[in-house]
Image (tube, rainbow, N blue to C red):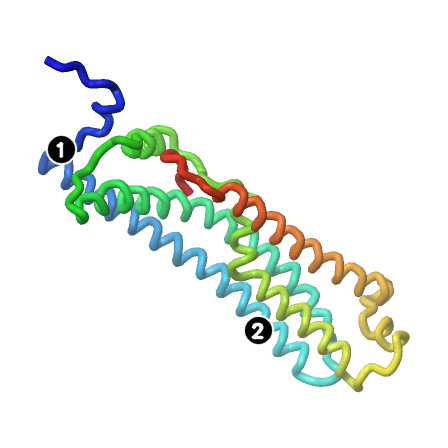
Amino acid sequence: MDQKTPLENLSQPVVFTAAELGAIAHLYRGEVYRSTIWRTRLDATTNWAVATLGIALSVTFSSPEASPLPLLLVGLLCIVFLIFEARRYRYFNVWRARARWMEKHLYAPMLRGEGVTTANRWNETLAKDYMAPHHHVSMLRATGRRLRRNYVWILGIQAVAYYGKVAIHPTPLDSLDQLWARTAVGPIPGEFVVLAGFVFNGAWIGFAVWQLMLDMRRNRGRERADAMG
């Protein structure tokens, strides 16, 4: 009898019993269900950020004499929502990655009629993920993704609305002294508030670009079989 190499053994088709295939199908349905639930939770935090921004816009532009301060505060509140959403995204990514893993390595080969093999050890990767569950993305990476997807637009609208409010209400600006007077917050001078606003938004833009570059570097030519998330 010919001896097969370990690689040849790994590439042999896997035959599941009816009970095993049924269990895997239920497992897949469970992962899809959990990813759907956490996807809904992600949408909920985005809705909170949009709703609070809408309230701040309504209050600030309700009259020419209304203070622009609510737009400053809502920017900070949106960052809190961003952190909440990044944490939820880390959980969502676990369930989504598992479901996608089974679709790619189990269901897709069956649909193509190729049979299921363990040539890339996808089953071991999935089993290890169940035996030692962990987040597939870091908190920083998750924050960068959610910032690029949603919150960069929310913060952009907030910044434009704030400076638009300052520029037109109660009358159009005609001097820098007016700008500093309108942007002052209590004892905090307007120059400091404007500078802080530019630093705040610039820092988040820089963070989003930095995380995008890191994501692109990680995904460039990635062929690893154990790469989930």
For the residues labelled 2 and 1, say whether their Cβ atoms are less than 8 Å apart: no
Q: Quadrant of residue 155?
A: bottom right
Mark seen at residue 78: none
Q: Which residue is located at x 84 percent, y 74 percent?
A: 179
* Drawn side of residue 156 relative to residue 164, left or right: left
* Drawn side of residue 62 relative to residue 4, left or right: right
Quarter of the image where the N terminus is located: top left
* Drawn side of residue 76 relative to residue 36, left or right: right
| Vertical order, 71 against 19 (above or below) | below
Q: Position of residue 38 (x, y in %)?
A: 39, 52
Q: Position of residue 144 (x, y in %)?
A: 56, 51
Q: Position of residue 11 (x, y in %)?
A: 23, 29
Q: Give the residue type that dot 1 points to.
A: Val
Quarter of the image where the C terminus is located: top left
Near mark 2 (Cα within 10 A), the count class, few <14, some 14-19 or many ≥20, is: some
Q: Which residue is located at x 57 percent, y 44 percent?
A: 214
Dot 1: element? loop
Q: Mark 2 vs mark 1: give the one in front.
A: 1
Q: Which residue is located at x 76 percent, y 83 percent?
A: 169
| Vertical order, 164 against 186 (above or below) | below
Task: Pick whichever of labels 2 and 1 is earlier in the sequence.
Answer: 1
Q: Which residue is located at x 33 percent, y 42 percent?
A: 98
Residue beneath disc 2: 54
Residue beneath disc 1: 15
Q: Give the residue type that dot 2 points to.
A: Gly
Q: CA distance from mark 2 to mark 1?
A: 56 Å
Near mark 1 (Cα within 10 A), the count class, few <14, some 14-19 or many ≥20, is: few
